[in-house]
Image: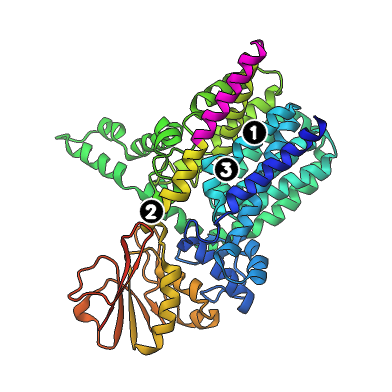
């Protein structure tokens, strides 16, 4: 029995790894943001500069969205060893996601001293659709979350032993999360502040030991703050922030115009700031909506699986049961209970401040407290049944495992089979076939025109052709930013990206279209896995 208990956690971690690793190179297809992270790491390896020619930046201009550089630097050793491939780009997040599962176990065992509950928490996170989805790709949100979870564990550990060492590791991990993802720059400080407020009396006694880690954390955090303020970070907020949605402002004007004579009271009632506050409240509360959590999930196809919520539907009642258990149990201290609820309420704040909410990507930190509550619900469920006759209890356990297993199987079917057929356009499948083919043909044509029906095609071409970074650094030129702050590249070498206008394309050209109206049949078609045309190739 002791041997069995010792192998449960390693077994959970192996299963977590396999779920997240199998088919990682092509399921799902590499998206432009991942390609940008990988290609810029590749560019740094070869030239010491990013695609735009900036030397070792902390924020990467990329599409004009100024990506935090942490993930790029994490991926450098993997791309250096394995080459510029999807799997090399995704491996840092895969490894960090397994560490997240491990440290959730460590955290729950530390604050509850309940090994069974800790194991259940690790298992629930292992099979979490929300966590699996953002573990299988170069998702900066997932990587940043891992550092937050690790840092949280070391904070609670510092309360119990080796304060200076563990508190230093807490501050270091939280600061590192700031280098990886924009949303972490709000969530991590709020969580850190919550922990420090909850344990203020304890920390004030350790004040002499706190000063050095805090100063060190400030020194480490200063470059990313400086870079954020001076390298497009504020522009990024303007592009995706709440005020990027002009709806509340327009609604304010509409309501004011309905009054014959606009008075001060009318301006107070229909103030656009009030409407933006209402809009924020709606966006924030939408993250706790049953439709988002358990039924349809995120509206963005790249952030969801077909007919799936962010968690398994069976977990909704378990979530509620777990909240009841947490409130009642003595396994957790009152402060750790408060922190779990604060974690849940803080996690979606960054997402709610954008116009695209609810966002499974930006609100990913929610998966940790939700996992803990669900796990507590499972644990509590069997406490309620513990006095039943052993045969009946065993039958209930079997039925529960089978039912839960059904929902897990349903998710795997949705993700690994239907996902690629339902959302191939969103994930931009078949670029890994198109680009190598065009590389063999490019010298036969003066120009190659590629449709802009797909998001940021240029970076996928750079990635899959392993185009020399020193060449693109001198050729790259971004278009004017769109209303969301994004730009793109219209062309490089003899590739041109944009709308396909057949009459304006010169002779001796190769044209790659999507669903545009072309006055002749294609000579070659590349298909999605659902047998719909992905690319139609024409000669002129």
Q: Nearer the viewer, mark 1 or mark 3?
A: 1
Which structural element holds mark 1?
helix
Q: Nearer the viewer, mark 1 or mark 2?
A: 2
Q: Give residue 343's mark.
A: none
Region rendered in magenta: 386-407
**Residue carrying label 1:** 121
Q: Nearer the viewer, mark 2 or mark 3?
A: 2
Distance from the alpha carbon under mark 1 to that under mark 2: 32 Å
Which structural element holds mark 2?
helix
Please tell me which of labels 1 and 2 falls first in the chain.
Answer: 1
Locate residue 539: give its quadrant: bottom left
Q: Give residue 421's mark.
A: 2
Locate residue 335: give its quadrant: top right
**Residue carrying label 3:** 187
Q: Are marks 2 and 3 in contact (CB under 8 Å)?
A: no
Residue 529: x and y, percent? Answer: 38, 59
Q: Are marks 1 and 2 in contact (CB under 8 Å)?
A: no
Residue depicted at x 45% and y 66%: 63
Query: Viewer-proximal residue, 34 or 2?
Result: 2
Residue 232: x and y, percent? Answer: 49, 62
Residue 343 lies left or right of residue 240; in this view the side is right
Q: Inspect this view and state whether residue 71 appears.
A: yes
Please tell me which of labels 2 and 3 falls first in the chain.
Answer: 3
Locate residue 205: give its quadrant: top right
Quarter of the N terminus within the rendering: top right
Distance from the alpha carbon under mark 2 to that under mark 3: 35 Å
């Amino acid at each position: 029995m002791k041997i069995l208990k010792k192998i449960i956690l390693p077994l959970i971690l192996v299963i977590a790894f396999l779920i997240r690793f199998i088919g990682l190179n092509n399921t799902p297809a590499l998206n432009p943001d991942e390609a940008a992270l990988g290609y810029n790491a590749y560019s740094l390896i070869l030239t010491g500069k990013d695609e735009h020619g900036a030397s070792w930046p902390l924020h990467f201009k990329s599409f004009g969205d100024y990506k935090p550089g942490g993930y790029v630097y994490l991926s450098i050793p993997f791309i250096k060893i394995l080459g510029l491939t999807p799997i090399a780009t995704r491996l840092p997040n895969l490894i960090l996601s397994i560490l997240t599962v491990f440290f959730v176990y460590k955290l729950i065992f530390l604050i509850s001293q309940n090994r069974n509950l800790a194991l259940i928490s690790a298992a629930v996170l292992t099979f979490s659709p929300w966590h699996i989805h953002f573990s299988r790709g170069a998702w900066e949100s997932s990587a940043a979350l891992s550092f937050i979870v690790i840092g949280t564990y070391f904070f609670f550990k510092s309360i119990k032993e080796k304060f200076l060492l563990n508190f230093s590791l807490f501050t270091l991990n939280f600061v590192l999360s700031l280098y990886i993802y924009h949303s972490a720059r709000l969530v991590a400080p709020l969580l850190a502040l919550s922990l420090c407020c909850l344990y203020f009396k304890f920390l004030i006694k350790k004040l002499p030991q706190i000063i050095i880690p805090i100063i060190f954390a400030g020194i480490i955090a200063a470059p990313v703050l400086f870079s954020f303020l001076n390298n497009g970070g504020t522009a990024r907020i303007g592009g995706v922030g709440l005020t990027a949605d002009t709806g509340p402002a327009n609604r304010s004007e509409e309501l004011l115009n309905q009054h014959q004579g606009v008075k001060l009271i009318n301006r107070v009632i229909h103030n656009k700031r009030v409407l933006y506050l209402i809009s924020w409240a709606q966006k924030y509360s939408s993250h706790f909506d049953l439709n988002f959590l358990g039924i349809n999930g995120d509206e963005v196809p790249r952030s969801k699986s077909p007919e799936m919520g962010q968690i398994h539907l069976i977990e909704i009642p378990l979530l509620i049961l777990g909240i009841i258990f947490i409130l009642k149990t003595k396994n957790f201290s009152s402060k750790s209970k408060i922190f779990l609820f604060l974690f849940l309420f803080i996690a979606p704040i960054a997402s709610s401040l954008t116009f695209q909410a609810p966002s499974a990507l930006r609100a990913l930190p929610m998966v940790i407290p939700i996992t803990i509550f669900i796990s507590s619900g499972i644990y509590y469920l069997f406490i309620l049944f513990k006095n039943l006759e052993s045969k009946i209890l065993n039958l209930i356990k079997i039925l529960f495992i089978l039912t839960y297993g059904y929902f897990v199987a349903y998710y795997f079917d949705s993700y690994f089979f239907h996902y690629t057929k339902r959302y191939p356009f969103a994930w931009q499948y078949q670029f890994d076939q198109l680009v190598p083919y065009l590389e063999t043909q490019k010298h036969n044509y003066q120009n190659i025109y590629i449709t802009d029906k797909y998001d940021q095609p240029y970076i996928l071409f750079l990635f899959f052709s392993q185009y020399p970074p020193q060449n693109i650094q001198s050729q790259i030129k971004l278009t004017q930013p769109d209303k969301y702050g994004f730009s793109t590249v219209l062309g490089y070498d003899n590739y041109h990206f944009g709308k396909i206008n057949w009459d304006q394309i010169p002779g001796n050209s190769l044209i790659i279209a999507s669903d545009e109206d072309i006055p002749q049949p294609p000579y070659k078609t590349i298909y999605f896995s659902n047998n719909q045309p992905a690319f139609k190739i024409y000669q002129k």
